[in-house]
Amino acid sequence: MHTGRYAIPTMVTRQRDQTRHRLLDAAFAEIHRHGFQAASVADILADTGLTKGALYHHFPDKKSLGLAVVDEIIGKRMADLFVQPLMTAERPVQALLDLLEEKSRQPEASLRLGCPLNNLMQEMSPVDEDFRTHLHRILVSWQTTFEKALRRAQAAGELRPEVDCRAAALFIVAAWEGCVGVAKNMQSVAGFSGCMGQLQSYVTSLLADSSAA
């Protein structure tokens, strides 16, 4: 076996990957706290203990770092939270209702800073087309996941046949983000839970037999 000749390159690659992940995690936390435009590169480096050289080795500028946060941190979290559970669920609408119920019980600390996706959409979409495009891609993926879940339920006879699944999916996404935004402003877990409860009622009303859920 000739493992020695590959050990150093593999180790270097792993270290580079770890450095990149540390930068992304620190940048995500900084952006979530302060927004992208006010995010401090100096604070990101202080959080990681890395140098500017390490940062610019992986990301040529602050904007490329921010876009990577959108794609690789926020996008992945959205996929893990919503896409995978709903795409594999045998009863997708019930899975959606369960997800709404679970998220409605978020602790106050998690609501204080709001949704990182929504925060960046509000801050960056009007002023930077690249950010708008990357954020829009995540939003469309989220809406498409809900739409496919609703269509599967409709095909199985669980959803009312007259429901416009595309429009309903967009409304669910918009209402969900609205609930988080209102809770961020109110700093109220009760307000968030009540808003999400109304969204659950809306999804339940789409069922062919509304008493089934």
Image (cartoon, grey):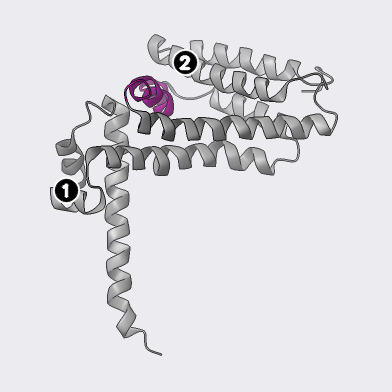
Residue at the location (59% across, 39% down)?
83
Q: Residues under labels 2 and 1: Cα distance?
A: 35 Å
Quarter of the image where the N terminus is located: bottom left
Number of callouts in the render?
A: 2
Residue at the location (67% across, 25% down)?
166
**Viewed as shown, does residue 26 lie left or right of 134?**
left
Question: Which image quadrant is residue 116 in?
Answer: top left
Query: Is residue 121 one of those drawn in magenta?
Result: yes
Question: Which image quadrant is residue 165 in?
Answer: top right
Under mark 2, the amino acid is Val
Residue 51 visible within the image: no
**Label 2 sits on residue:** 189
**Label 1 sits on residue:** 49
Where residue 113 appears, as percent x and y from the top left, is 35, 23
Where residue 146 appears, as percent x and y from the top left, is 64, 30
Where residue 206 appears, as percent x and y from the top left, is 75, 19
Tell me the magenta residue range. 109-127
